[in-house]
Amino acid sequence: MLEQIVDDYLQLQGYFTIHNVRFKPSADHAEYVSSKDSVPSDVDVVGFNPALPPPRRRVMVASCKSWQGGVDRPRILAQLRDEAPNPVRPQWLRFRELWSPKWAEAFRARIAELTGEEAFTHAIAVTHLRGDRRLGRRSDRRALPERQPL
């Protein structure tokens, strides 16, 4: 349902969209581990708007999180940084395209392959946001590890 809402919104903004774009690290990557990296991940919605002139971002990428209990950004960020207990499944697996350098590299390469564009905007769409809404915004980038801009 959330994916469909994001898809409809992007189409109303003039984007062509595609769903469930799969990606995984290259087997040639120095840090590739077959037992951990051979199963692809996917990003929920990719939108491309060829009518937008540069320097506007013509590509929008959305990861949809429609978790029943909602998304608690401070708790998730603490788990990602190993400052809080992790659930059974490590939290970084849910955000691998942002958290793991080899997965981020594969993610960026797949989006570039699909759209022909190196630059894009990535958003996380949620059905329910929990916790302090002021935390985790662009101004709180110090919380994230150093990364190349998407």
Image: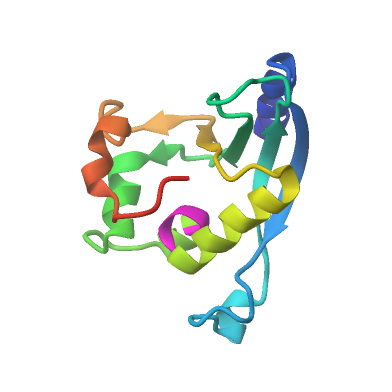
Could you say where residue 31 lies in the image, as x and y percent from the top left? 48, 81
Image position of 66 (left or right of 75): right
Q: Residue furthest front?
A: 54
Q: Nearer the viewer, residue 129 or 17?
A: 17
**Residue 65 x %, y %:** 55, 41
- Tell me the quarter of the picture where residue 34 sits: bottom right
Residue occupying image coordinates x 52% and y 56% = 97
Q: Is residue 89 visible?
A: no
Helix, strand or loop: magenta stretch: helix
Above/below status of 134 relative to 115: above
Tell me the magenta residue range. Answer: 96-100
> At x 54% / y 42%, what residue is drawn?
67
Q: Position of residue 128 (x, y in %)?
A: 48, 30
In the image: residue 17, left or right of residue 110: right
Picture residue at 74% right of the left edge, 48% below the top = 114
Membership of 7 in magenta stretch: no
Q: Percent from the top left, x then y, of residue 41?
A: 64, 61
Q: Which is more toward the observer, 69 or 93?
A: 93
- The tally of labels here is 0
Q: Residue furthest top?
A: 12
The image shows residue 135, relative to residue 118, as above or below, that is above
> Which residue occupies the foreground of this view, 62 or 83?
62
Q: How is the image coloured?
A: rainbow
Q: Relative to 99, does residue 77 appear above or below in the rendering?
A: above
Does 31 sit left or right of 60 as displayed? left
Q: Is residue 106 above or below residue 37?
A: above
The residue shown at (57%, 38%) is 66
Quadrant the N terminus occupies: top right
